[in-house]
Amino acid sequence: MAVDLLLGLQWGDEGKGKIVDVLTKDYDIIARFQGGPNAGHTLEFDGIKHVLHTIPSGIFHDNAMNIIGNGVVIDPVIFRRELQNLDKFEGLDYVSKILISRKAHLILPTHRLLDAASEASKGKAKIGSTLKGIGPTYMDKTGRNGIRVGDLELADWKDRYTSLRDKHISMIDFYDAKIEYNLQELEAEFFDAIKVLKKLKFIDSEEYLHQAQKSGKTILAEGAQGSLLDIDFGTYPYVTSSNTTAAGACTGLGIAPNKIGEVFGIFKAYTTRVGSGPFPTELFDADGETMGRVGNEFGATTGRPRRCGWLDLVALRYAVQVNGVTQLMMMKGDVLSGFDTLKVCTSYKYKGKTIEHFPYNIEPENVEVVYKEMKGWKEDLTGMTEASQLPKALNEYIDFLEKELETPIKIVSVGPDRTQTILR
């Protein structure tokens, strides 16, 4: 059986958690393949909002097993908090529904301190880190110093921890960033959380998934962040520390490239970004303020307000191309209701030339946006349940995007609840 992928195509916050939740009924396994608690996947049903950071978004369905893959980095303290939130749901046996790869790396308390010290030392050049210790953990992973979940099964794992912790402390001192911390308290919380983590089942996830495919199980790989935050193909250095694109699912789960099936790409009907970095279509006027207010654009992990702007087709084409997207899903169409005119970026003027591809550098001194104007719609979409109910102007907007992206838009989201999802 092929493994389907679900990816964000912008700078994250596209609504991946909601769509995974909607699609889970069709899958036996939901598997996270990269990122860590810098992700915030928001699900809403029965009038209640749920935010997941590490746990796959299929956890609220009885039919699906949820795997945290080797490409993920896990903060035991935040993970324990997530599990405690699941305790509120009577009958939800998450101990039997969550499996963790032995090859996933652990975020230590000193990784978070290193993150804070590094960011503080950058001054105005800050990248907008979530300060969750993600970057330093991936640095230890690639530097072959990291501690993995499987190490918790070894007798000497605390010795390994102590050695890495001491190295981190010397690095924190090097930054001279004057951050305050109580390591004794942080470590006490960390080791308590490790006890909870060890109650779950650790697996050799690549073998588990291989056998699942052989036996005909359906698998959906769930990405975190967005394609424009990919460490290789994103707007570097304002990116995350993992491969958020389709290729990351292969390395983050141990799945062969020829086993990939559908690639679902999720994008907002407009564009948002959290943190620093270039953003060609960013708005600083009443339209941008309206998008942020109506769309409730605040980071699910950090609470920071998201920067808002018109849809950027240059960036979106790039993401579709890099990921090999086979189906598109447009989120937050309801947020654009009420605009008389919509704008869509169709090309850039880049160093004096008009281009339609995503260039190496999109800093404002190099890029001028070329817009196409389209008619807006006034109708409230939030109560609509069928594609036939969508207003004409919205259908024209969707048709234009499909033509430009050469990819069908199969789902239109018209609100945050799982029921506010229209199939086309």
Image: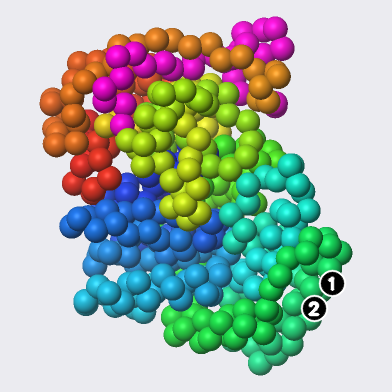
Q: Is residue 210 left or right of residue 357?
A: left
* Residue visible at 41% across and 24% down in the picture: 286
Tell me which amino acid carries mark 2.
Asp
Q: Is residue 222 left or right of residue 96?
A: right
From the viewer's side, name the closer residue of 124 and 276.
124
Q: Residues within 10 Å of mark 1 (few under 14, many from 20)?
A: few
Residue 179 rendering spot, x and y as whole percentages: 73, 65
Please tell me which residue lies in front, 81 or 354: 81
- The residue to which callout 2 is attached is 166
Count the marks.
2
Circle number at residue 344 = none
Q: Which residue is mark 1?
A: 170
Amino acid type, callout 1: Ser
In the image: residue 364, left or right of residue 88: right
Residue at 69 percent of width and 79 percent of height: 183
Image x and y of residue 154, in percent: 64, 88
- Cα separation between marks 2 and 1: 7 Å
Identify the magenta region. 335-361
Above or below 207: residue 228: above
Closest to the observer, 124 or 134: 124
Compared to residue 240, the image places residue 290 above or below, namely above
Q: Is residue 145 above or below residue 188?
A: above
> Considering the numbered disc 2 on the image, is that residue within a helix, a strand or a loop?
helix
